[in-house]
């Protein structure tokens, strides 16, 4: 999967420099010349990283960053700010909004590539992409944490998956582990003594075998200073305690490029079923939306003409889920596919509260939905 880099800058020269910098990598560079265009492009393509200028007409970088971080579907996209020397202090002030790093203009191409490579996996153009694993394939997760209870908690949190969780308590043990077996993802406690988390991060990133392994920082929610330091160092993401395991599972899946479509899409002889989970939050909605066109295309190619949207486990129907279903229904109509909805009593009642869904008809079960087609 090619890395999508969105550069938002009113200077055409800077945008050209950015495109040139990533020419030798397996990247797609997308452009926007102000914050309004940048937000629209981000919503459309869901880039892997955004390079955002501060000073722009129409909507500046600060306003765009604020709106980006307030959008549940876009807030997890890492952002590197671009600023003139005089704007360095301004970047530090807005760092709390959520920037991963910053670069002072004018900059060298190798500096830009180095900063970006700390956040996303930059592969040389033409290099073969590793085989994508599916959600039910085993992966290895290393947890570096000096509190055994947290390690046990993470192991229990992933018991329902085929994933292997290994726990160590120190930097030395983590290095020894990685020499014997390269994990697919590493979770490091940011509260390890003597700044060990940052030291371990640098050691892992300097080793050719582990350079591109996703690194997550584990931190107490209120420890904002250590979280900021970890983000500046280049950690892939920060996981706060107490841990939201659904969110963690989604982030691990994305970081190691797992094909997670199997959680939601099932193709059978005559039907495709799209199953929405009980906690259908913004992250899940975004994940399903990203797979929708591909999986629907596979269904059409397989000769399937019937689709059932299964919302029986959904706890509540909010506007985000409604938008997803509207998008899904439109796609079905565009492809001349038959579709039906299955939902529980709560979903049915919730649907009546919105103008967009008040006339929807839900079947009580997937079997009933299939029979209605």
Image (cartoon, grey):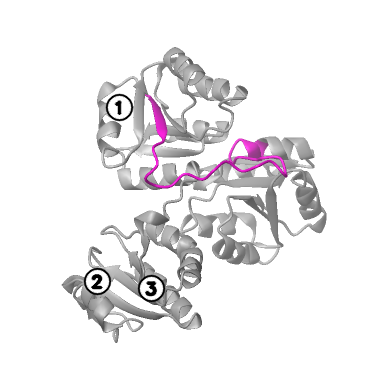
Packing grade of label 2 (10 A; few <14, some 14-19, many >=20) is many
Give x and y (percent) for residue 365: 20, 72
Secondary structure at badge 3 equals helix
Disc 3 designates what residue? Answer: 325
Q: Is residue 94 visible?
A: yes
Stretch of the chain drawn in magenta: 115-144
Tell me which secondary structure the magenta stretch mostly adopts: loop
Q: Mark 2 or mark 1, which is nearer to you?
A: 2
Residue 55 visible to the viewer:
no
Q: Residues within 10 Å of mark 3 (few under 14, many from 20)?
A: some
Q: Which residue is mark 1?
A: 151
User: Residue 143 occupies which quadrant of the picture?
Assistant: top left
Of the image marks 3 and 2, the number of the one nearer the N terminus: 3
| Between discs 3 and 1, the one toward the N terminus | 1
Nearest to the eye among marks 3 and 2: give it.
Answer: 2
Q: Which quarter of the rendering shows the C terminus?
A: bottom left
Q: Tell whether position 360 is magenta.
A: no
Which residue corresponds to mark 2? 366
Determine if the magenta segment contains residue 136: yes
Which residue is rendered at x = 64% and y = 66% of the image? 37
Instruction: Indicate left or right for 141 with 363 as reference.
Output: right
The residue nearer to you, when weighing 181 against 90, is 181
Relative to 172, say whether 370 is above or below.
below
């Amino acid at each position: 999967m090619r890395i999508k880099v969105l550069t938002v800058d009113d200077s055409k020269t800077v945008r050209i420099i950015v495109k040139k910098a990533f020419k030798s990598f397996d990247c797609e560079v997308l452009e926007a010349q102000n914050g309004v265009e940048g937000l629209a492009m981000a919503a459309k393509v869901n880039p892997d990283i955004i390079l955002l200028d501060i000073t722009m007409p129409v909507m500046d970088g600060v306003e765009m960053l604020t709106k980006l971080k307030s959008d549940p579907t876009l807030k997890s996209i890492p952002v590197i700010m671009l600023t003139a020397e005089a704007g360095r202090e301004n970047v530090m002030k807005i760092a709390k909004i959520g920037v991963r790093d910053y670069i002072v203009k004018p900059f060298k191409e190798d500096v830009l590539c180095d900063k970006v490579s700390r956040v996303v996996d930059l592969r040389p153009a033409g290099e073969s992409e590793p085989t994508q694993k599916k959600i039910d394939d085993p992966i290895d997760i290393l947890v570096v944490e000096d509190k055994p209870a947290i390690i046990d908690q993470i192991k229990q949190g992933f018991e329902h998956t085929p994933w292997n969780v290994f726990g160590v308590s120190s930097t030395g043990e983590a290095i020894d582990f990685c020499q014997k077996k390269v994990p697919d993802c590493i979770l490091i406690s940011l509260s390890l003594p003597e700044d060990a988390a940052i030291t371990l991060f640098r050691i892992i990133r300097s080793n050719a075998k582990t350079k591109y392994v996703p690194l997550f920082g584990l931190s107490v929610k209120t420890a904002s200073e250590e979280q900021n330091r970890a983000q500046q160092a280049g950690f892939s993401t920060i996981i706060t305690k107490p841990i939201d395991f659904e969110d963690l599972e989604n982030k691990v899946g994305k970081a190691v490029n797992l094909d997670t479509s199997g959680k939601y899409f099932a193709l059978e002889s005559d039907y495709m079923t799209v199953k929405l989970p009980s906690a259908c939050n913004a992250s899940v909605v975004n994940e399903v939306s990203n797979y929708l066109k591909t999986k629907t295309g596979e269904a059409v190619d397989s000769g399937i003409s019937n689709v059932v949207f299964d919302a029986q486990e959904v706890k509540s129907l909010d506007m985000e889920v409604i938008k997803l279903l509207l998008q899904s229904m439109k796609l079905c109509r565009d492809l001349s596919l038959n579709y039906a909805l299955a939902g529980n009593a709560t979903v049915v009642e919730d649907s009546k509260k919105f103008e967009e869904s008040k006339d929807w008809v839900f079947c009580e079960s997937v079997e009933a939905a299939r029979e209605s087609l």
